[in-house]
Amino acid sequence: MERYTDLIASLPAWPVLDELIDRALREDLSGGDLTTEATVSPGTQAVATAVAKSELIVCGGPVFERSFRRLTQPTRFVVHAAEGARVGPGAPLWEVAGDARGILMAERTALNFVQRMTGVASLTRRYVDALPPRGKTRVTDTRKTTPGLRALERYAVRIGGGHNHRDTLSSAVLIKDNHIEAAGGITTAIERARRYAPHTTKIEVEVETLAGVDEALAAGADIIMLDNFAPDALRKAVRRARGRAFIEVSGGVTLARIPELARAGVDAISVGALTHSAPAADISLDIQRAP
């Protein structure tokens, strides 16, 4: 039975995770569970198994377990599929045993979390698998996450084989078009950021033209984000920046374009769809009354 000892550090701190779970449980149980309380006798024991209904990348087992533990004390929790494993329809994922009432009341909350997380991990793996083998390019997420669930979705991206971009606005300098406009230009924005930010912080700037690439390089940008570049302009930008700046591609990125972008020599491809457009995975919870 896997206990997730290698994963705990990757998840949000338990108090943060517990707060997320408790908020979700309150949405369902603010007035109790009328159906369960009416139909299931106190003390009834049950075994519930989460089952994949389609091919997916498993993600969220520790959150699944924790969702039940916030409401009840399971007598047994078994992991059938490891985090990051690819499984097919009908595969058992996790098993929880204990008080039937508690299991039924936490069922939807637990499934909502893992369906979301597994969906993100599964979509991320598709993008990562599209990269040419033995290349340097990485697929990263963005801050286009579900409000309140960023930590879980970023964890899911990592489980899917992707990488994380900046976590919060304070974790990196990323000068975008609106910053450039408000500052009065690329060079001015970079110079101000260089004076203000700690010396340990890299400066990233988003550009939309080859002229913007040249200006950002001249101003000493560490990372250049190429926003919605056409293929020919993209290749030219990579050649100009090679050895001088880390190159990231963003905007208009589709799964079909991943091989082309990677072969162009970019260092990172940021994909907002990993979190804002991932469909929920199809996972069911099959409950059986224990003898």
Image (cartoon, grey):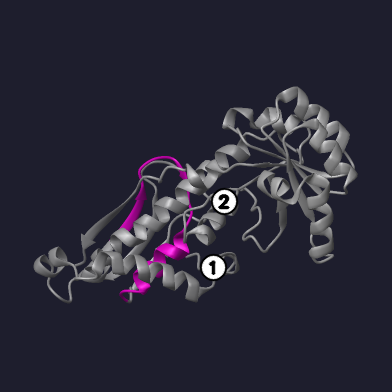
Q: Reply above or below: 277 against 106.
A: above
Q: Is residue 35 left or right of residue 251?
A: left
Which residue, as the protein is rendered here, is positioned at the far left?
38
Q: Which mark is residue 12?
A: 1
Residue 67 in the image: state x and y as whole percent: 37, 67
Q: CA distance from mark 2 to mark 1?
A: 14 Å
Which residue, as the protein is rendered here, is positioned at the far top?
232
In the rendered structure, which segment of residues is drawn in magenta?
Answer: 48-72
At horizontal 86% and vertical 32% (from top left) the residue drawn is: 239
Q: Could you tell which of marks 2 and 1 lies nearer the N-terminus? A: 1
- At label 2, counting other C-alpha atoms closer than 10 Å, the crowd grade (few under 14, some 14-19, many 20 or more) is many
- Name the secondary structure under disc 2: helix
- Name the secondary structure under disc 1: loop
Res 11 quadrant in image: bottom right
Residue 70 in the image: state x and y as whole percent: 36, 74
Residue 183 appears anywhere in the view = yes
Residue 61 is a magenta residue = yes
Q: Which mark is residue 157?
A: 2
